């Protein structure tokens, strides 16, 4: 578009076919992909003016070449919008989102997103398919790795921080990209934790929990949203007009672009809601602006725009004018997005090879990644202070994952280079002033079929041909000849991620057997778990002296973990997801609704509702609670104080104050968490809701007052039979205010807030 031309002028010159072309999004296919491409004919599409956006490029050169074709080779010279999955870093890979959320440090989350945006923007990318803000309460679901966890309040803060970090203050800036909140909505509520499965949710839970991070992300200015693959309450999300056009655009005021997921429109046919024309029309009218990879808009909209569509069998009657109007509206949104991200000013401004070379994996980016990796590690157990490792200690570092680059980045780091990743062995050798020797000890998995599936995007399992006996003996000999064992065990990176749901949440069997053997070696054992999801670690927690959940830490994961093991950094993480004691406990989250039963009665059997769960495992809370994590010092909290003590209808908020004291011997940080219970309400409420948190760093002996403002609005909640009739209400009366360093160990005070 020439300078000075408006979108109105441009649209006035475009044919309907060209407008439909702007709604078409294809992949350049230069990286890994998750679906079956229906078209790869990018050149032909560009020549016809039938392509609006492209993702999956892997270099500035490629972006420039496609952009040249788009600008010079088409009638109106409309630039392409380049997009990419930038989930936890672009070239410098940061810890997994579930790990980043576990830092509870939103300044850190924002900083990682700033770096990711700068690296991506320098390569010509103008939109990223992130942040993924799906609430995930079922650890079987593989995409929990990409999510900010189980809690809507924490996830909403994560969504805001990510949007701020990615988009910055000015979307046209050379280090900013448009964010895309995904996957709208309730993708994480898939039945049985099976990826792609549908969700059935009461309207209040759907909007109050699953849509809450989207509301927050939209309020923070997110420029785009991606629809989810699943159906919600019987309606597939790519055709969910009530939720997309109604709630997202209507109630939330979202004015940006809605993108389909990979062949998400095409897959509406498999959902069983009609033929290709029907699903194309339904998606368009629902408000999905861009069709990713399915080319259903391209194939069908011209005809539907000319003739309309009547399908009595699925109850649709759309007249041509309605379709033309919807095409115009979506095309305008695509063009507005291109304008917002600066493409009409200069389509090549963002293809800056020198800048890309300077920024890619820049030392400052790596430093941040290292700091982030330590800040996300969750220390779950530290008996006898075995961590940090004593200086000079001779370390037996055991496990395939300890000397591994291929898995370190974690799932869906599509532009990350595993060759750039530091291994834990390298990190520990650089950081620890004592001998560090390594043995493999066991294969990651022992089932060749699973190994083949895990290798989907390249070899990551590397099965050792030796007998397990031989590997165990080697590891035991090393352990016996060392002062301390550090065993790194867990998942391969592709155990989690898309289409990687699991029915068992254990560390794979050969590595479990290895831990059993090492626990008998008479040396202290530190177990470092790498995983993309909450695993069941009950037995492991009993066997190991120290337990660290390191997730997948990214490019500098090996060094960040070494910093934690040696005490150069504190383990900063606090669980963003509850860890189950048994697989059968999931789905699990800290705020389960109150129930009438089970109760403490005469018969043991009725106590937890579970027949086979030991009494010491809280049935609704898991093995380690949400918000839990240790550091290298200790903290104490006083009971909370609330002012005014007797709030009335005239008070809009109360202040909750709590004193926190470092009672340990070294400087350290903790996260003070504020929860609220509404014990008497007009309907069943969550047992507890997170309403605030603050990270505090204190010297030994130092105390500080942390103050939270709790508004009456924060105590309100949604009630209603349908999405359209939801109302926010609050119930005056008793509220219980809790503070704690996790969701289970709380100091509480009751207040009465009169009308
Ligand atoms: C995923 C999206 C992703 C897209 C493009 C899909 O399979 O669900 O999250 O953005 O592929 O890679």
Image (cartoon, helix red, strand yellow):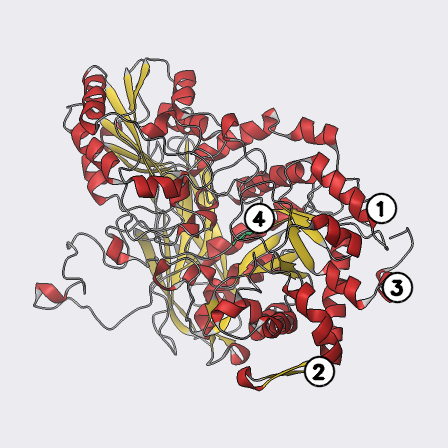
Q: Which of 402 and 440 is in front in this view?
A: 440
First reached walking from the N terminus: tag 1 or tag 3: 3
- Sequence-wise first label, 1 or 2: 1
Q: Is 433 situated above or below 42?
A: above
Q: Residue at x 31, y 35 (%)?
A: 444
Number of the label disc, if any, that sits on residue 13: 3
Q: What element carries label 4?
A: helix
Instruction: Give the mark nearer the N terminus: 3 vs 2.
Output: 3
Visible residue check, residue 207: no
- Asked whether, in this view, residue 304 is left or right of residue 130, the answer is right
Nearer the observer: mark 4 or 2; the answer is: 2
* Between discs 3 and 4, the one toward the N terminus: 3
User: What residue is pinned by disc 2?
Assistant: 319
Q: How crowded is mark 3: few (under 14 residues within 10 Å), some or many (20 or more)?
A: few
Q: How far apart are marks 4 and 2 (CA)?
A: 42 Å
| Number of marks | 4
Question: In front: mark 3 or mark 4?
Answer: 3
Residue 687 falls in image quadrant: bottom left
Residue 546 placement: quadrant: top left
Query: Residue 129: x percent and y percent?
Result: 59, 50
Q: Which mark is residue 72?
A: 1
- The tag on residue 261 is none
Determine which residue is flagged by label 4: 161
């Amino acid at each position: 578009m020439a300078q000075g031309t408006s979108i109105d002028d441009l649209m006035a010159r475009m044919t309907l076919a060209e407008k439909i072309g702007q709604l078409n999004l294809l992949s350049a296919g230069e990286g890994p992909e998750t679906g079956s491409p229906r078209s790869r004919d990018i050149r032909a599409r560009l020549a016809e003016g039938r392509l609006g956006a492209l993702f999956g490029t892997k270099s500035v050169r490629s972006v420039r070449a496609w952009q040249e074709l788009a600008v010079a080779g088409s009638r109106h010279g409309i630039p392409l919008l380049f997009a990419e999955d930038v989930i936890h870093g672009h070239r410098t890979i940061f810890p997994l989102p579930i790990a980043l959320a576990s830092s509870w440090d939103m300044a850190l989350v924002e900083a990682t997103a700033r770096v990711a945006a700068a690296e991506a923007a320098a390569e010509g990318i103008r939109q990223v398919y992130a942040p993924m803000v799906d609430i995930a309460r079922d650890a079987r679901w593989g995409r929990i790795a990409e999510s900010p966890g189980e809690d809507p309040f924490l996830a909403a803060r994560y969504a805001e921080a990510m949007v701020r970090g990615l988009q910055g203050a000015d979307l046209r800036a050379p280090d900013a990209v448009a964010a895309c909140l995904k996957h709208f909505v309730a993708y994480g509520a898939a039945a049985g934790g099976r990826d792609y499965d549908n969700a059935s949710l009461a309207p209040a839970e759907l909007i109050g929990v699953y849509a809450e991070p989207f509301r927050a992300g939209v309020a923070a200015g997110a420029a785009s949203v991606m629809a989810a693959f699943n159906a919600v309450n019987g309606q597939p999300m790519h055709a969910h007009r009530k939720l997309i056009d109604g709630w997202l655009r209507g109630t939330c005021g979202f004015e940006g672009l809605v993108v389909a997921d990979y062949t998400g429109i095409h897959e509406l046919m498999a959902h069983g809601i009609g033929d290709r024309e029907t699903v194309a029309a339904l998606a368009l009218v629902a408000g999905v602006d861009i069709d990713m990879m399915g080319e259903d808009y391209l194939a069908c909209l011209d005809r539907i725009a000319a003739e309309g569509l009547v399908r009595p069998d699925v109850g649709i009657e759309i007249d041509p004018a309605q379709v033309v109007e919807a095409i115009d509206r979506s095309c305008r949104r695509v063009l507005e997005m291109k304008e917002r991200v600066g493409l009409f000013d200069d389509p090549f401004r963002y293809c800056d090879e020198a800048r890309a070379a300077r920024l890619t994996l820049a030392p400052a980016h790596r430093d941040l990644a290292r700091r982030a990796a330590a800040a996300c590690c969750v220390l779950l157990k530290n008996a006898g202070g075995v961590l940090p490792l004593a200086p000079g200690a001779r370390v037996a570092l055991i496990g395939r994952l300890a000397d591994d680059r291929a898995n370190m980045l974690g799932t869906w780091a599509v532009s990350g280079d595993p060759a750039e990743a530091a291994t834990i062995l390298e990190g520990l050798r650089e950081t620890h002033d004592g001998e560090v020797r390594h043995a493999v000890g066991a294969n990651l998995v022992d089932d060749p079929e699973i190994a083949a599936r895990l290798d989907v995007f390249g070899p990551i399992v590397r099965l050792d041909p030796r007998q397990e006996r031989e590997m165990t003996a080697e590891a035991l000999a090393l352990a016996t000849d060392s002062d301390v064992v550090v065993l790194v065990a867990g998942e391969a990176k592709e155990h989690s991620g898309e289409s990687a749901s699991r029915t068992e949440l254990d560390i794979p069997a050969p590595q479990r057997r290895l831990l059993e053997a090492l626990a008998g070696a008479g040396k202290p054992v530190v177990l470092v778990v790498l995983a993309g999801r909450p695993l069941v670690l009950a037995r492991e927690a009993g066997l190991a002296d120290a337990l660290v959940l390191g997730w997948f830490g990214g490019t500098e994961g090996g060094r960040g973990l070494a910093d934690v093991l040696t005490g150069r950094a504190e383990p900063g993480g606090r669980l963003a997801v509850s860890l189950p004691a048994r697989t059968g406990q999931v789905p699990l989250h800290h705020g389960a609704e109150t129930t009438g039963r089970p109760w403490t009665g005469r018969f043991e059997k009725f106590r937890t509702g579970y027949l086979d769960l030991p009494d010491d495992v809280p049935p609704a809370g898991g093995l380690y609670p949400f918000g839990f994590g240790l550091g290298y010092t200790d903290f104490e909290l006083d009971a909370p104080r609330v002012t005014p003590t007797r709030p009335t209808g005239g008070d809009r908020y109360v202040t909750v104050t709590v004193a926190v004291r470092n009672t340990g011997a070294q400087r350290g940080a903790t996260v003070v968490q504020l929860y609220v219970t509404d014990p008497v309400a007009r309907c069943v409420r969550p047992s507890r809701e997170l309403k605030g948190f603050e990270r505090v760093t204190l010297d030994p002996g130092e105390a500080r007052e942390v103050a939270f403002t709790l508004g009456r609005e924060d105590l309100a909640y949604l009630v209603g039979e349908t999405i359209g009739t939801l109302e926010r209400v609050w119930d005056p009366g008793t509220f219980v205010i809790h503070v704690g360093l996790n969701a289970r160990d709380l100091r509480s005070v009751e207040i009465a807030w009169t009308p």
